[in-house]
Amino acid sequence: MHHRPEPTPGPSTVTRSGPLTWVQQWHWFEHTIPAPRRVNPTPLADHCHVPPPATVADIHLALASLTARHEALRTTVDPLLPIQHVHRADWAPLPVDCVDVPAADADTLEAATAALAALPIDPERNPPWRARVLLVAGKPRAVLVAAHHIVIDGWGLAVLIGQLHDQLRGEPTPAEASVHPLDMAATQHPERARAAEREWLMRLASNPTGLLAPFGGTGKGGGRHRLQHRSVEAYDDLDRVARRHRASPEVVMLAALAHDVATRTGEHHFLASVVVSNRARAALRSSIGVRALTVPVQIDLCPGAAFGEVVASVAAACAAAYRHGQWCPAELVAAQARMDRRRGVVTVPTIEYNCYSWPRDYLVPACNTPPDGPTTWISSTPDEPCDTLYVDLGRDAGTVTLDVTVGDHLLDTEQAMALPVRLCALLRAVAEGAECPVPARALTPAAAGWWRAPQGWACLTEVEDVLRGHPGVLDVTVTPRGDAAGEGEEPHLVVHARVAPDVTSDDLHGHVLDHLGEVPGLVAPRRYVLSAAGLESGRSPTSLGGARTPLRPPVTDPERALAAAVAGVGSSTGTFNSLAAVDMNRCLADHGVTLVAVPRLLALLHQCGFTGIASDELAGTASLGRLAAALEPLPPRAPGGETSP
């Protein structure tokens, strides 16, 4: 959102408008984040084969019919406000093209689908989807569909492709109108959302951080791995275990993942963020609108518990989490950022789990690799780091597919490849009757230099490196104190620092807080002890016990511009409307600014002539002063009034 917003579609084509649902808010905010750092794929893409004797004209007719039936296919969103607009069915040409290919084999389909997904979709001015017909010798063989996540989720895309395939086969489609997200906005209960937010924050606050980082990965790892593993044998094993323990296959696989994490790390209490379709009502199952959301599943495993007990525990935790399946992401993320900064701990869960529980038998087989063959690499590149382990489960045509995405600092290449193999081996052992009890201690030792703080795992050398980056710090030593070090007192970290006379404990504390989320394993110590050698004459060593940092008003031009933007957004939300209320030592969330206000804040910064920070940086825990230091003046305008590249 560092460009001037274009005008929204003309009102003559709009049939109705309204707010984005709570679930849509995150995806609306996320499309303003630079693409490499987005969590969710945008757009989503998939494909189906074309049954003979369907023609290109039949495909166009079917897509036109689906556009008329599904309002989501003709919905746009506002660039600065969380508002969506539904247009007439004929408001824009069908976004369909045709491409000639030599064959419609699995490799071609995979590459073509990936190429279509890589094309940008502008949900502010154009239809939020596009389709591509693959022609072999002039005849249609497959249809690829890509959709923006703001208005269509993964389940919805599967429903859309399924109905397209049914129409091409001449089968009747559902007669009832599809439920649009606008229809759901009025049914959301604010009190339930607040209760869910409290539940979420409570779970986050009681869980360890840096869960996987001490037990693998590459030091200073800056990239991510993406891989896919398929197994035919695991399909039968998963079904056998699920039937034996009367649980869904999806819950069993999550239990296997939880068992593996506990075995590796020795942690028996941690969070897993689980994606659910949120389509319990029959009317929603044929809706292509955004309904899928993430719920926090609290994993609590007992050392020595057999795998059947693990399944029962995970199933109960999932049921408890689903009851809190609605919240307001814009406010939740702000509340989490406030909590992170005050506790000095990043509370993002380490484990993410997603399952594609809908049938996809109409798809052309995606890969010809032999059953239980080697892992297939999608990519492994040193791009933006991934701070979470993502495991996606798919069960298509008798094959279990595990997609793994993980940051290099959490699991290195060999460890990432070994994870799905290990999960399938666990399923085989359990299916054959093994108990597979949960180990009481980690089978993998923690890396040197990591310490189990009360708030989670901390890397002492990382804390030292961050503190050395503060101007005026001459030398730093970080040591654990208390029970974890065998000293019989409350465990905490102590930082001994030789500093210049003008450096204070408050300076060091704010510096560490500003780096939360950037450095895995960084925990803000509860107190700092400054060595007397680095203090002014006559001063004694001082300690810090979480004292409030004094208010700091903006002083530089970038700081004043950011403060003005924060005040401008605050005045429109009823938070505050004065520069005097903006404290540059606090983060954006502390000023009551939520995700839905970030695009407007960036637009105000642009009007003030500044750029250089992205929307996801504003959603973090960095202070306004640190953010302002990254601001840059806009480049001079090129002839014609546009900003030069």
Image: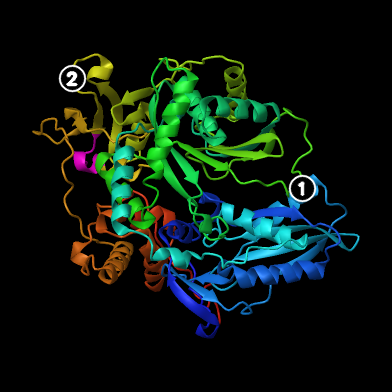
In magenta, the rendered stretch is: 499-509
433 sits left or right of 512 in the view: right
Indicate the position of residue 595 as horizontal and vertical percent values: 38, 59
Instruction: Give the residue type that dot 1 points to.
Output: Val
Image point 40% across, 48% down: which residue? 325
- Label 1 neighbour load within 10 Å: few <14, some 14-19, many 20+: some
Which residue corresponds to mark 1? 364
- Tell me if I can see residue 613 in this picture: no
Which residue corresponds to mark 2? 489
220 sits left or right of 117 in the view: left
User: Dot 1: what SS?
Assistant: loop
Image quarter hosting the C terminus: bottom right
Image point 83% across, 66% down: which residue? 55
Give the Cα separation between the discs numbered 1 and 2.
Answer: 62 Å
539 sits left or right of 36 in the view: left
Is residue 453 one of those drawn in magenta? no
Instruction: Give the residue type that dot 2 points to.
Output: Glu
Front position among marks 1 and 2: 1
Q: Earlier in the sequence, mark 1 or mark 2?
A: 1
| Quadrant of res 133 | bottom right
Q: Residue furthest right?
A: 137
Q: Residue 340 carries which label?
A: none
